[in-house]
Image (cartoon, rainbow, N blue to C red):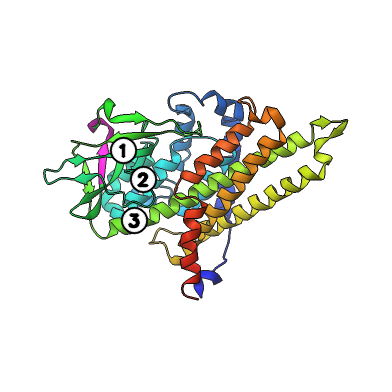
Amino acid sequence: MSVIQNVSIGLSEEQAMLLDVARGFVRDQAPIEVVRSHLETETGYDAAIWQSMVEMGWAGIALPDTVGGAGMGVGSAVPVFEALGSGLLGTPLLSTTLAGQLIWRAAGESAADWLGRLCGGSVATVALLDQADWGAANLGVALNADGTLSGAKHYVSDAGVADIFVAVANEGGAPVLAIVERDALSEAAIAPNTLIDLTKRAANVDFSGVVPAQVLRGESVASALRDTLLLGALFTAAETAGAADKCLRSITEYLKTRKQFGKLIGSYQALKHPTVDIYVGMENARSFVYHGATVVGDEALSVDAEVACRMAKVSADDVMVYAGDRSVQFHGGFGFTWECDSTLFIRRAQWAQQMYGGALHHRKRLASLLLDNR
């Protein structure tokens, strides 16, 4: 059965180059001190860093060159997100990339103007959740007969800086995508959320009374939405695997320098074994992530691709939760303080579990995908 036989994994020369360049960018432009300096700012990131990322072509890296993108394929975004995760760097790249994928998969080149704006640096986001419930249909926002929207979306990523909103709405029982310009929303329509991970931003957005700039309809919308959610899981898993690597490096550095009772604490097996477990889990997650990068494409995602995206998210969430917890415990009382980077890791673990489905969400769906037809 192909769904369990496809174990292909590859890292192309282009992807390897992207990973090296992105890691160097994060190391030079966003060391942890810079990231910390933006934790309590309004946007959570430096606009100059975002502009540099746009100039490097990352805003359109997953889009075809016919609409202004880099034409490198959707899998090429994975090494970039891994590198960003390794620096805990919060920018609107994830939101913009997913909005671009949703528009592209729903409308193709007929939406070239919107996609060109995204490639040029306009920030976009997908407004999906009505009640923040993964079990709901998420169609509480309606497109009315007079062409206006009614209803609100919750926890819209990067809504505070978004230029373009892609709101999933209901029209006669069918899902449509309402593209809304920032100028169409009043300031009161956006209510910021407080997230546990302060490198990330989100807000509730009230679309009531707004007339969309364009509405995307048709059978392709449901398929595009499904694929975009799976890609969201994959890209978030890539970020999370990168964050787990950063956490592991922080732990090992501490174990090699901290002494207790006259000995380096890294010499104790009670700390060595969990550290090895984190390393194994992190490499396992990276394998699943790059398997996902290998099998996803610009066409509708196959069952193999769905399995890969879900497995990547499960493995990345699991190792990040464990790594964040061990980092806090290994650092003792200091690990619980704001000054210790351990708090950033455990917060990132909590955030990641809530994005595009947690490990339990995906395991339930993997069970039917992998076992029902055996």
Compare marks 3 and 1 and give the one earlier in the sequence: 1
Residue 335 belongs to the span the image colors magenta: no
Magenta residues (range): 178-184
Q: Secondary structure at mark 2?
A: helix
The image quadrant of residue 248 is top right
The image quadrant of residue 221 is bottom left
**Which dot marks residue 224?**
3
Compare marks 2 and 3 and give the one earlier in the sequence: 2
What is the crowding at mark 2: few (fewer than 14 residues within 10 Å), some, or many (at least 20)? many
Is disc 1 in contact with disc 2, using a CB cutoff of under 8 Å? yes
Q: Which residue in the protein does label 2 denote?
A: 99
On the image, the x and y values in percent for residue 181 come to 26, 36
Q: Which residue in the protein does label 1 denote?
A: 164
Is disc 3 in contact with disc 1, using a CB cutoff of under 8 Å? no
On the image, the x and y values in percent for residue 157 come to 40, 38
What is the crowding at mark 1: few (fewer than 14 residues within 10 Å), some, or many (at least 20)? many
